[in-house]
Structure formats: structure tokens, C-alpha cells
Image (cartoon, grey):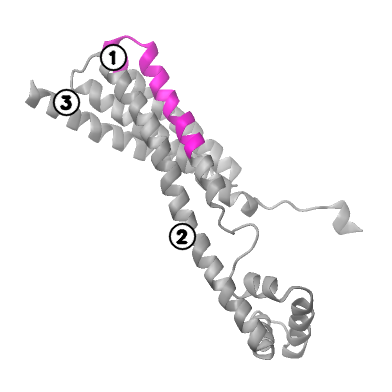
Amino acid sequence: MRAKKHPESHLVARIGWLRAAVLGANDGIVSTASLIVGVAASAASSSEVLVAGVAGLVAGAMSMAAGEYVSVSSQSDTENADLAKEKFELENDPELELEELAQIYAGRGVELNLAREVAAQLMEKDALGAHARDELGISEITQAQPIRAALASAATFSVGAALPLATAALVPDQWVISTVSAGSLVFLALLGALAGRAGGASMWKAALRVTFWGAFAMGITAAIGALLGTTVA
């Protein structure tokens, strides 16, 4: 009764979507802002800067979606192969698999006879699920979901990339570099703080981490853009 009145909600359930969302938004802000600042530093016109920014948004979103799908699909393939192997072993040598599961529980501190009873009861209900969870470390929370990860990354990349792009479109040419740089650092700090809060971590530490690397990326890109612009001119 007490457990029913006090349901628990753990932050680990957010790992899948939070990782993809933070990665996508952060990459969208950093890569697009860096691209805009680099092109603007080469003395390009405002239309050229905006075209580069839009191209970066579209290409980046597609790249994030494809990359995330392929990456997470590889994880999913590995999980499915392990599950198929475990299913085969359960069908051909269930006694050995029962003892293997019992030894896992015993290793965690459960008395061996009790561990065997627990393993037997769990395998009677869902043998593959028990081995997937306790032997392979695969659960519903951590299981790979390629399509969801791809869509989340593409969507959040687009949102992140739209922020510096909109900033560049709204300010005069001579203010593009400073305004996009400053605005993007603010966006990154807010993103880091929100990600830290959602993940139960320090908001300040998360904000500082993404802001530092964002500033570093934009600084390097601006320097290269200015150098190439001078060389070409």
C-alpha cells in the first residue's frame, strides 16, 4: 500500500531522448553559428552568409538523422544478436542458464539457494527477459530505438540551428559576427542548464561545459574564415 501511495520516478528513464535532444540542439547551435561566423569573417555578403546558414541547417539535420539512425541501429543489431543467442541457449540448455542467472544474483549478495529459487521463478515467467535484463544489461529503458533517436536528433538540430540563423537574418551585416557569437553562447548556456536540470546534474557545470566548447569552435572557425578571406582577397 505504501509503495502504491509513493510511486518513484527515476531520471535514468530520460537517458535515451535526453542524449539525442541535447546532442542535436548543441550541434545545431555550434555548427550553424560557427559556419555563419566563419563565412561572415571572410567578408562575404549578407545573402551569402544566410545561404550558407540555411544550407548548414538542412545538411546538418539530415546528417544528424542519418548518423544517429545508423549508430543506434548498430546498437540494436548487436542487442538482437545477443538476444537470439540467449534464446537459443535457453531452448537447448535451460538448466545451465538457470544456474548462470542464479550465480549472477548470488554475486550480488543473495544466498545461493534463494538465488536459485528467484532465478527459477523469474525464468518461469519470462526467461529471455530475465537474462536480457540481468545478464546482458538490456532493458526497456536502455534498449536502442533508431527511428526515435534519428527524429529527435534531426528536430532538435533544426531548432538549435534556427537560433543563430534567425539572429544573423535580423541584425545589420557589421554586427553579424559579434551578435551571432554572443547570442549563440547565451543559447548554449541555456541549453546546458536545461539539460543539467533534466538530467539531475549541476546546471552551472553543464552550462559552462557547452558554452566553453561552443566558444572554442566559433573562435577557431572565425579565425579560419578571416584567414581565407584575406588570402582569397
Disc 1 crowd rating (10 Å Cα; few below 14, some 14-19, many 20+) is: few
User: Where 13 sits versus 218, above or below?
Assistant: below
Q: Secondary structure at mark 1?
A: helix
The x, y position of residue 156, in whole percent, is: 50, 35
Using the rendered view, name the quadrant where residue 100 is placed: bottom right
- Give the residue type that dot 3 points to: Ala
Q: Earlier in the sequence, mark 2 or mark 1?
A: 1
| Separation of residues labelled 2 and 1 (CA atoms) | 40 Å
| Separation of residues labelled 2 and 3 (CA atoms) | 40 Å
In the rendered structure, find residue 47 and report the number of the disc placed on it.
Answer: 1
Query: 97 or 187, which is in the foreground?
Result: 97
Whether residue 54 can be seen here: yes
User: Where 25 sits versus 20, above or below?
Assistant: above
For the record, the magenta segment spans 154-176
| Separation of residues labelled 3 and 1 (CA atoms) | 18 Å
Q: Secondary structure at mark 2?
A: helix
Using the rendered view, name the quadrant where residue 101 is placed: bottom right
Q: Earlier in the sequence, mark 2 or mark 3?
A: 2
Q: Is residue 204 magenta?
A: no
Q: Earlier in the sequence, mark 3 or mark 1?
A: 1
Quadrant position of the C terminus in the picture: top left
